[in-house]
């Protein structure tokens, strides 16, 4: 599993009902079921990824996250996960509100655009490409790049309480100057 998924799995309680948005091939949900007996559903738009979920024996719905989460009732999940998908969402504020509506807590991970290597590439006139931002500018699914500070500002504006934060680089925790030295951020949040 990716480093952010390992952190996410540690934050999901045994038996928790999980909704994984942008679940990819469903590997996180499968792991949570096998290791934590945490039942869940995945939401994915990509055809091939939906087929991978089915092959992984994961419950999946093919839904566009931009339309919101109206399929789900209030507090129908213990935990809603948005793993390395935040930067691909056009209507970020709407999705954050919807996640907090349907889940008791939310876990979000995203590549930190404030990492020093991204800043350096921009300073030299190039859009960043890295392990956490692997696409060239002309083929990227990313529509919003954000930094750790940007995400925390959004949480304050939406009255979202940050319960835990883990900043990583190359899989290792970063505590000193995380917005500069961390390439990936993982947050556990609830409504305030």
Image (cartoon, grey):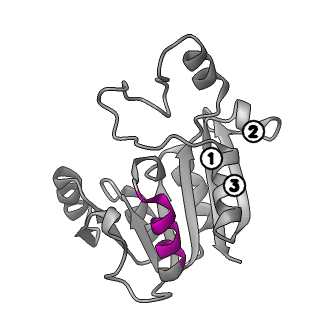
Distance of mark 3 from mark 2, alpha carbons? 13 Å
Label pair 1/2, CB-CB below 8 angstroms: yes
Instruction: Tell me, for residue 185, which label it has, or none.
Output: 1
Q: Which residue is mark 3?
A: 152
The residue at the point 43 percent across, 52 percent down is: 85
Which secondary structure class fits the magenta region best?
helix
- Decide which of tag 3 and tag 1 comes sooner along the chain: 3
Camera-side residue: 139 or 16? 139
Q: Nearer the viewer, mark 3 or mark 2?
A: 3
Q: Which residue is mark 2?
A: 178
Q: Position of residue 157 (x, y in %)?
A: 67, 64
What SS does tag 3 mark? helix
Label pair 3/1, CB-CB below 8 angstroms: no
What SS does tag 2 mark? helix
Q: Which residues are magenta?
A: 91-100
Magenta-colored stretch includes residue 110: no
Q: Position of residue 123 (x, y in %)?
A: 60, 15
Residue 16 visible in image? no
Distance of mark 1 from mark 2, alpha carbons? 9 Å
Residue 12 visible in image? yes
Q: Is residue 35 above or below residue 16?
A: above
């Amino acid at each position: 599993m990716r480093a952010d998924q390992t952190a996410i799995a540690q934050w999901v309680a045994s038996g928790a009902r999980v909704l994984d948005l942008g679940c990819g091939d469903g590997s996180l949900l499968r792991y949570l079921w096998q290791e934590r007996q945490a039942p869940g559903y995945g939401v994915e738009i990509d055809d091939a990824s939906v087929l991978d979920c089915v092959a992984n024996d994961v419950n999946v719905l093919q839904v566009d996250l931009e339309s919101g989460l109206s399929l789900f009732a209030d507090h129908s999940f213990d935990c809603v996960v948005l793993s390395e998908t935040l930067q691909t969402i056009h209507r970020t504020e709407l999705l954050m509100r919807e996640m907090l509506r349907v889940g008791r807590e939310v876990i979000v991970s995203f590549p930190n655009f404030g990492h020093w290597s991204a800043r350096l590439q921009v300073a030299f006139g190039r859009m960043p490409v890295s392990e956490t931002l692997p696409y060239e500018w002309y083929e990227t699914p990313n529509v919003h790049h954000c930094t750790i500070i940007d995400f925390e500002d959004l949480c304050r504006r939406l009255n979202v309480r940050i319960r835990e934060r883990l900043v990583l680089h190359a899989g290792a925790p970063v505590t000193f100057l995380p917005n500069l030295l961390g390439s990936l951020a993982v947050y556990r949040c609830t409504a305030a």
